Image (tube, rainbow, N blue to C red):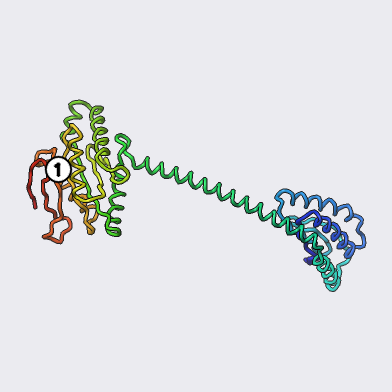
Amino acid sequence: MDEIFNINLITEPDFQRLNNFLMKGVEALSEKNYKSAKTIPELTKEIRFDFNINKTPLKACLVLDKNILSLKWKDKTKPLALISSSPSKEKIKYIRDCFKDELSNASPELLRLQNLEIKKSLEKAKMEAKAEIEQIEKQLDLRKRELQEYIIKAETDSLTGLLNRRAYTRHINSALRNLRKRNQIFCLLYLDLDHFKTINDTYGHSFGDKVLKAMAMNMNNCIREKTDLAFRIGGDEFAIIIFSDETAALRAARKIINGIQQGTSIGYTKAEKNDTPEVLIKRADMALYFSKDQGRASIASAVKSPKTEDPSASSLEIVYNGKSQTSA
């Protein structure tokens, strides 16, 4: 396949030049051109239609494939004329060079118009790309919000509105990573309603649910919003992550006990950098059960023992209700 010429169609004068060049190409390669005189306007009308759809430059090529002279643009190839005898390579080269000279000798006014149209096309493409990017960003924001809403729903206890066990596991791991990397200290509190089974058995589960909701509200009122985290980890068992030291943890525990009628036992411990989630949870749990053993409605803290390298070894000290006791 030999390419005779190609032309970029940008402005209306380019279509007029295309008509002229097609007639010249047919005349140069074929003696019988009367059929092409009818075909050429039809093809330029079709190619102009394609141009007007997107208003972007098109490239049109006159090609000779064996004995068929055709016009190509985009993914289309339309025949113009049938050549009776194949022209020599020298003739094709001569015709191609003639068209090359004519195409390169465009008038300054035509070049100005072409540059203006190219600028308009680029500006249009830029605006379309900007609009498309904005639409994509809107879709991404929407998906992010939907994902965030799904995560919140999946990590929220449906009865109390507190974070659930799934969220608890994630936040414990995250808090320990931040403790090691950024030295962001925190304390873990374990809480348990005293005699909750008796409350349920005596007054029914509906009343028990009200007690759980009251406990959740009380916990939220005693911690810092958007800083500390409160969880319901199952039944009447709760947990709080206080992003501060033992003094702040004890202060929050006292507020919680004073803020609810039902007795509440609380155990807490400060996280250490070498703690694993299991070790940290075990210390808080040990403190909670020590608190219950001392008569409930009290607070116990679990402090890592300095006498052993075992990270799970702790000494326990009652720090509320006027009691002071240490357990190895």
Which residue lies most toward the bottom here?
A: 90
Q: Is residue 4 left or right of residue 161?
A: right
Residue at figure coordinates x 23%, y 31% from the top left: 211
Residue at figure coordinates x 27%, y 42% from the top left: 231
The quarter of the picture where residue 201 lies is: top left
Q: Nearer the viewer, residue 99 or 26?
A: 99
Residue 14 visible in the shown view: yes
Residue at figure coordinates x 88%, y 62% from the top left: 24
Amino acid type, residue under disc 1 in the picture: Ile
Which residue lies most toward the top here?
A: 203
Q: Is residue 150 left or right of residue 76?
A: left
Q: Nearer the viewer, residue 118 or 81?
A: 118
Q: Is residue 124 left or right of residue 252?
A: right
Residue at figure coordinates x 21%, y 47% from the top left: 248
The residue pinned by badge 1 equals 299
* Residue 242, image x, y percentages: 25, 47
- Residue 177, compared with residue 192, is above or below; it is below
Categorize mark 1 by other alpha carbons within 10 Å: few (<14), some (14-19), many (20+). Answer: many
Q: Is residue 71 left or right of residue 284?
A: right
Give the total number of marks visible in the rendering.
1
From the image, which quarter does the N terminus lie in? bottom right
Residue 65 visible in the shown view: no
- Please tell me whether mark 1 sits on a helix, a strand or a loop: strand
* Residue 85, image x, y percentages: 88, 66
* Residue 61, image x, y percentages: 78, 61
